[in-house]
């Protein structure tokens, strides 16, 4: 795929069979969409003027974009509170309107474009590899607005910390986990799982090995005693991401998972383990 | 049905600013769970957090979520957990039915 292909994907997705408008976002993305109805066009122009008006601030933009005058918001879901629904999020005009809020923040010196752009360092291939999905699936998520990007030299770049927290929707069963847990002199490794373990076998005294196929979340507490000092850590894992392994001595959990919670303080780890309800 | 307010900082603790695209990812997550979300118009409030002896000062925006029933608690938990990871926060402030919690 040539360097220009990634950014041009969004433009190519729009059929050129009628009037279209385009908007260049602060992150370099170009949004192309069909000419909207007159009332929506008028509202876009109103928000643009407000973004450029030095007498109006960011709060004014938020009030306008999320207020009852915005014709693309859902006005019926919660009386008196216009809502952003999935349909609204799928509408490129919503992204245009919220981009004007960012433009206002830039003008007010609250959003530093150079500093923000600098945090987008991950290529699409790197992000796809980390998430354990195909590059095509990643581009699809980007085009759907589910992953923010920054355009540099006609390529998409992603923020590693955002990629790390990206919720992956999987079709089909979650990735299988391989576990070895139990206790050994001075150390222990315990797991809490919501369902039943498979292929459980005794490896040696106080140690079991098993697999877990159907899971949304598991908890681990591991640690041990050195002298008179106890050090325990608590983790909560969810499916997704690149292959990972958490291990302590002979014990481990390995597979494709993300750590969604981690506690390194022993007392807090035990408290979290005690309260943990999967 | 009742409304839950979730206070989200404008910037991460390392000073990085969150763009509207970043907020849209969170909005999509909430919309998937509860059907819709809103930002309270014109609301950016100052907040102060103290954690482990370090003081963090935030400017926050407030998201409003329509909760169908108190039995939706597990979905609220998922939204809070995602908010914490997506916005790289130690905790988030929520307000509902006249009470407030730091989760």
Image (cartoon, helix red, strand yellow):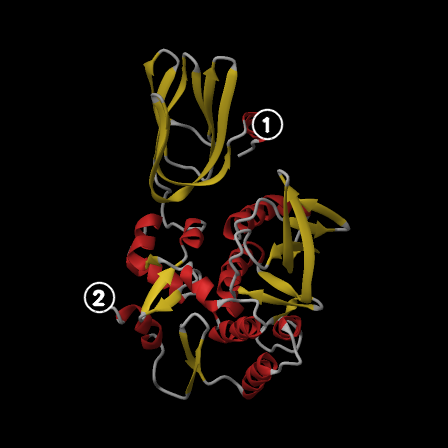
Pinpoint residue A146: horizontal percent, then vertical percent: 44, 61
Q: Are marks 2 and 1 in contact (CB under 8 Å)?
A: no
Structural crowding at the residue carrying mark 2, measured as other residues with C-alpha within 10 Å and reported as few (<14), some (14–19) or many (≥20): few
In the drawing, what numbered circle is on residue A102? none
Q: Is residue A29 above or below residue A233?
A: below
Residue A8 or residue B13, whichever sits in front: B13
Secondary structure found at label 1: helix
Residue at mark 2: chain: A
Residue A135 falls in image quadrant: bottom left
Structural crowding at the residue carrying mark 1, measured as other residues with C-alpha within 10 Å and reported as few (<14), some (14–19) or many (≥20): few
Counting residues from the N terminus, which is met first, the one under dot 2 or under dot 1?
A: 2
Locate the N terminus of chain A and report the quarter of the image it occupies: bottom left
Residue at mark 1: chain: A
Furthest toward the right, the residue is: B98
Pinpoint residue A67: horizontal percent, then vertical percent: 66, 73
Q: Can the viewer see residue B1?
A: no
Q: Can the viewer see residue B20?
A: yes
Secondary structure found at label 2: loop
Q: Is residue B70 left or right of residue A214?
A: right
For the point 39% across and 63% down, which residue is it?
A142
Total residue callouts: 2
Q: Marks 2 and 1, Cα distance to the nearest angstrom?
A: 50 Å
Q: Is residue A171 above or below residue A102?
A: above
For the point 49% across and 59% down, which residue is it?
B25
For the point 58% across and 29% down, which residue is it?
A268
In the drawing, what numbered circle is on residue A1? 2
Pinpoint residue A92: horizontal percent, then vertical percent: 47, 74
Which residue is under mark 1? Answer: A271
Residue B1 or residue B15, whichever sits in front: B15
Q: Is residue A62 above or below residue B87?
A: below
Q: Is residue A85 left or right of residue A217?
A: right
Residue A177 falls in image quadrant: top left
């Amino acid at each position: 795929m040539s360097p220009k292909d990634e950014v041009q994907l969004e433009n190519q997705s729009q059929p050129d069979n009628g009037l279209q408008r385009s908007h260049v976002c602060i992150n370099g993305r170009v949004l192309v969409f069909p000419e909207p109805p007159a009332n929506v066009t008028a509202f876009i122009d109103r928000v643009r003027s407000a973004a450029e008006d030095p007498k109006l601030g960011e709060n004014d933009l938020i009030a306008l974009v999320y207020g009852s005058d915005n014709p693309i918001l859902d006005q019926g879901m919660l009386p008196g509170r216009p809502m952003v629904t999935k349909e609204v999020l799928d509408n490129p005009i919503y992204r245009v309107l919220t981009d004007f809020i960012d433009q206002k923040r830039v003008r007010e010196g609250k959003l530093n474009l150079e500093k923000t752009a600098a945090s987008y360092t991950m290529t699409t291939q790197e992000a796809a590899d980390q998430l354990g999905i195909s590059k095509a699936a990643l581009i699809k998520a980007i085009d759907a607005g589910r992953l923010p990007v920054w355009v540099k030299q006609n390529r998409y770049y992603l923020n590693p910390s955002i990629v790390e927290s990206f919720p992956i929707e999987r079709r089909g069963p979650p990735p299988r986990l391989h576990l070895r847990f139990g206790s050994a002199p001075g150390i222990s490794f315990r797991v809490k799982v919501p369902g039943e373990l498979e292929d459980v076998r005794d490896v040696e005294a106080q140690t079991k090995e098993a697999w877990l196929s159907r899971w949304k979340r598991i908890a681990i507490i591991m640690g041990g005693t050195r002298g008179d000092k106890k050090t325990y850590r608590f983790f909560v894992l969810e499916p997704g991401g690149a292959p990972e392994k958490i291990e302590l001595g002979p014990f481990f959990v390995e597979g494709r998972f993300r750590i969604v919670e981690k506690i390194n303080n022993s007392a807090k780890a035990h408290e979290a383990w005690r309260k943990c309800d999967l | 049905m009742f409304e839950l307010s979730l206070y989200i900082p404008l910037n991460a603790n390392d000073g990085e600013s969150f763009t509207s695209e970043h907020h849209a990812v969170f909005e999509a997550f909430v919309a998937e769970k509860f059907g819709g979300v809103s930002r309270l118009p014109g609301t950016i409030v100052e907040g102060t957090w103290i954690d482990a002896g370090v003081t963090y000062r935030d400017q926050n925006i407030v998201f409003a979520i329509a909760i169908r029933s108190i039995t939706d608690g597990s979905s609220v938990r998922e939204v809070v957990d995602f908010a914490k990871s997506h916005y790289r926060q130690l905790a988030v402030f929520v307000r509902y039915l006249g009470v407030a919690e730091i989760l």
